[in-house]
Image (tube, rainbow, N blue to C red):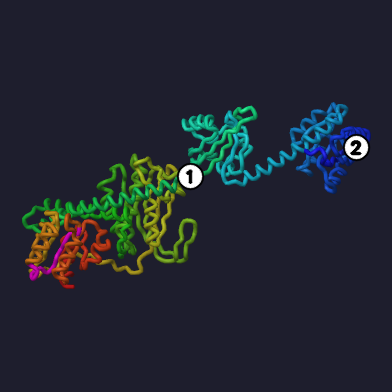
Amino acid sequence: MDTQTLIHVLLIEDNPGDRRLLQELLREVESVSIALQFAESLAQGIHLLRQDTVDLVLLDLFLPDSHGFETFTQLQQKEKNMPIIVTTGLNDETLALKAVQEGAQDYLVKGQITGELLVRSIRYAIERKRTEQKIREQAALLDIATDAILVRDVQNQILFWNKGAERLYGWKSEEALGRKTSEMLYEKPSLQLQKALQQLMIDNEWQGELHQVTKTGQKIIVESRWNLVHDDEGQPKFILVVNTDITAKKQLEEQFYRAQRLESIGTLASGIAHDLNNILTPVLATAQLLQMKSEILDPLSLQMLEVLERNAKRGAEIIRQVLSFARGVEENSTILQVGYLIRELQQMIWETFPKSIELQVDITEDLWTVTGNATQLHQVLMNLCVNARDAMPKGGSLHIAAENLTLDQPQVDAKLNLKAGNYIIITVADSGVGIPSEVRDRIFEPFFTTKEIGKGTGLGLSTVLGIVKSHQGCITVNSADGQGTEFKIFLPAATSTTLSQFDRAEPLLGQHELILVVDDEAAIREVTRASLEIYNYQVLTAGSGAEAIELYERHQKDIRLVVTDMMMPNLDGATTIHLLQKINPDVRVVAVSGSPHDKDEPGSVSLAGVHRFLPKPYTIEELLRAVHTTLRD
């Protein structure tokens, strides 16, 4: 402090002798300029503080209108930022010490005061107060920071804890101060922390990611920056720590990486689907062809062929579901009877679920229809049933129900947001372990799963929610830990009750038209040839695109239609079709592929002048209908 600066001091003292003594002591010190004011009571002193400029207060603890420690507290409450030096008698030194502990800058004992001592105390008090004020201002800046900022000593005890730390960890400053971070922020001792401390002592700084926990036990990830501060002698004094919460960022990164993996899986799934569909095509067609020879087969053989056909179709359906999920294939919506989907699911559950799970199915008579995608709704029901199975490792009961519901008024609340109208309610309930309350609100989040690593992707229920919403429906869950789980799906009823016709009408016979069948799989060529010949068509077969071109050039006048696979080695289907069109621009083509995406790929089917697309594996009926309609376009 500049010695020439005028210091304004207010002395609150009711004893005239003590006032004169302090005034004379200050006059003796020529190195400082002090303007001294007097007050004889606490009330008068507070009044003067509000009227005049004052740098410091000399306060007697015993005044006419206040006595003891209360004198200090009353003044401090009125003037929180004012430096205060208390004066007291020798017998009341304990009260003066208490005042210092509560915020006074210093205390002086009457009878032991000298001029130099008084001036030093005044200077010290003013400087200390200014320093405290500066620290408070800096702390206020730290408190508005979004990062968690803390200071700990070399024994790991917390010395400072800002508001950002309170928000991040949930511990109030008064709860954190004096405690060790190892007790508050970590579940168990960490080798990473030991290495970080070692590096800090060598480099005076450290930066890295830490896995920590909050007061409630929530796991978080922080980007942590440590700086080691030394004292005047170069010894480690304390550690400044700044932590940034990056939990959400890490979750987004993990979702991005999983999405990339899913994209790779989707690409892989397309290739696998093509191969599996090529395998299933002759299996399905052969099973159907053999059933036509019922006069030479016994009932058991016919039954086994029906099982073969049914399971080949089911395998094809599973492949379509995998592709729909992995690559987002959009399929057409139709009028559906939900009861049929549930009955199909019931058969699958009986065949594949543990016998310790008892299945009960209740479907209301005259159940209304819905407009939707059969594959997607089947996926919804299967996901919910698989989750129910996993929730009952020791067995239990699984209940699937479907019923009609009419809402006369819109129902809008936390669970339902439905317009008035007719709805189908599908219920999937189990007696399993239930969903703990702490995770119930997160079960529909993408990639959230409570299953062990490798046993769940966290995509099942998020996919379910997405499909239900795409059908203008909603889904609710009712569960308690250890008391089972019940999902309810609300789907709008179709405005028309007329079902799509899937009747197996007898396909129209051919009229000896010559069909060229092109496929690199011999089994598919032969079963397709046999199927067409049974229904009065003539057939030529080619095992490659080059062979197809050669045959077409020789029999161009007679060939009425080309049925060609799109994925073949050397000369693929698109190139083969392009070359056939050079020979005959009006050539009629049915494109066949084990990958349903081929019909949407630019330059593959849509731009190649193809009349029909026939996905593998196809039934004999689907093959005949594609051929029949294309010939008559």
Residue tagged 1: 247
Q: Which residues are magenta?
A: 555-566
Image height of 420 relative to 356, above or below: below
Which quadrant of the structure image shows residue 565? bottom left
Query: Is 565 covered by the magenta stretch?
Result: yes
Please report contact status of discs 1 and 2: CB closer than 8 Å, yes or no.
no
Amino acid found under the numbered disc labelled 1: Thr
Residue tagged 2: 14
Taking the spot 11% from the left edge, 57% from the top edge, the residue there is 543
Q: Secondary structure at mark 1?
A: helix
Q: Secondary structure at mark 2?
A: loop
Which quadrant of the structure image shows residue 110? top right
Question: Could you tell me how many numbered marks the image carries?
Answer: 2
Q: Residue 235, image x and y in percent?
A: 61, 27
Which of the two residues, 200 or 232, is positioned nearer the viewer here?
232
Taking the spot 58% from the left edge, 40% from the top edge, the residue there is 149
Disc 1 residue crowd, few under 14, some 14–19, many 20+, Cα 10 Å: some
